[in-house]
Image (cartoon, coloured by chain):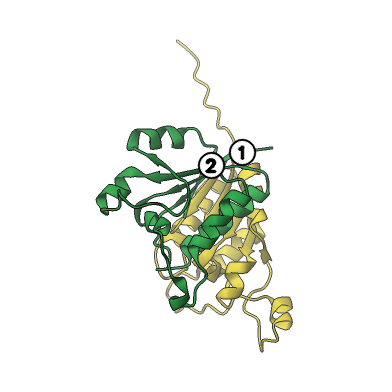
Chain colours: A yellow, B green
Amino acid sequence: MGLFLFITQVMIFSVSILSAPYTDQAAFSAYKFVEAALSKKHEVRRIFFYGEGVLNANHLNTPPQDEINLYEAWKELASSHQVELIVCIASALRRGVLDEDEAKRYEKDGHSMQAPFILSGLGQLMDAAIESDRLITFGS
Amino acid sequence: MQKKLLFISHKTPYGSFAAKETLDAALASAAFGQDISLLFKGDGVYQLLPQQNSSLLKRKSIGAILGALELYEVNKVFICEQSLLSRGLENIKPLIKVHVLNNLSLQVLFSEQDHILSF
């Protein structure tokens, strides 16, 4: 009889999210995917929020307490697994997702984004594509 | 390291910002020296219609951004034949030079990529 060895190959994933939370299921599906990948000991290097997806990073999102708080869920992933949460700055500014620096720069009364979410450019999406074994897109 | 990346654009040009944000991403990755292909599929084929007038919508012209593809040396631009046929657009003259692909050729295109980014 042969000896069967089950070797799990660790993969590097990155995820890009194109949909707003609470508009469709995509962002939540992305969260569940990342959770599953991490639980199987894969590495999730970066989550890139693009287009409507940047609305996930708005810390003013206040869903009712008996619904999933996706914002808090993303934050938790960042702190427990060091997953990078990168928000496309061009998409974000258009949609009112500004961190403190950008709010100052554009002379706004308040900001709507903060760490662990980080504003950056499309280069971070390219870098994720180059550095990861798989880049998975959620939403459209 | 250079990777083969296929961007799929499948949204109408002005119904949302998705078309513009797809092209922005494709141009950015071309600027990063990646091996880029771009495919217009589904409603994305409407982006290639000539004589767009986006000024009425106070929007930047998708046609003008398409013109920038050549400057960024994105030359592998494809359009899905089936999407054209099902919309009655098979006789349009696309704004820029595109290669029309049937379903079989699409399969080959997909299989050649390292990553597919669908917007």
Per the image, the residue denoted by label 1 is B3
Q: Chain of mark 1?
A: B
Q: Residue at x 45, y 47 (%)?
A: B39
Where is residue A11, by image quadrant?
A: top right
At a point 67% along the width and 86% down the height, the residue shown is A108
Instruction: For marks 2 and 1, give the CA distance.
Output: 8 Å
Percent position (x, y) of residue A130?
Answer: 64, 43
Query: Which labelled disc corresponds to residue B115?
Result: 2
Residue closest to the eye, A105 or A2: A105
User: Looking at the picture, how far across and down is residue A2, in whole percent?
Assistant: 47, 12
Left or right, residue B63 beside residue A10: left
Does residue A8 lie above or below B23 as drawn?
above
Question: Can residue A44 be seen by looking at this rendering?
Answer: no
| Any part of residue B23 in sight | yes
| Disc 2 residue type (three-letter) | His
Residues tagged 2 and 1 counted as in contact (Cβ below 8 A): yes
